[in-house]
Amino acid sequence: MLLNLLLESASSPNSLLGFLPILLIFAIFYFLLFLPMQKQRKQTAKMLAGLETGDNVLTSGGIVGTIVSLDSDTVILRVKPDNIKIQVARSAVSGMAPSSSEGKK
């Protein structure tokens, strides 16, 4: 009887060791996927908060323009060559574009 109890306890794995591979997979996903996404989201929020009049920006739709005015959630851009003004959502700004004076070096 004692021998049966010892054999049963030896054959059943520890429950913590059973969850170890799952925990390891979650840790890998966190460090490879979620942590870089959070870092990029913080950088984008910082960039959107630091927008100023006169900055050249690139929208998510591929439009390059110069900021004419800012609102809490909208941006008015001047787009060349005809200096057309368009209004876009602030969240549509995906990054800073090189200024036109840098491109004509």
Image (tube, rainbow, N blue to C red):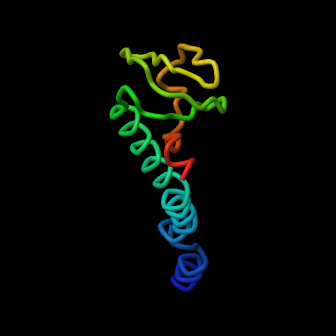
Q: Quadrant of residue 47?
A: top left
Is 23 placed above or below 80 here?
below
> In x, y percent, where is residue 102?
50, 48
> In x, y percent, where is residue 80?
61, 25
Residue depicted at 59% across the width and 32% down the height:
64
Residue depicted at 53% across the width and 20% down the height:
78
Is 29 placed above or below 83 here?
below
> In x, y percent, where is residue 104?
56, 48
State the residue in front, 61 or 3: 61
Residue depicted at 51% across the width and 66% down the height:
15
Please identify the residue farthest to the front as the structure is shown. 105
State the residue in front, 24 or 103: 103
State the residue in front, 47 or 98: 98
State the residue in front, 5 or 96: 96
Quarter of the image that includes the N terminus: bottom right
Is 20 placed above or below 87 here?
below
> In x, y percent, where is residue 92?
55, 26
| Count of residue discs | 0
Residue depicted at 57% across the width and 63% down the height:
25
Is 94 placed above or below 91 here?
below
Q: Quadrant of residue 73?
A: top left
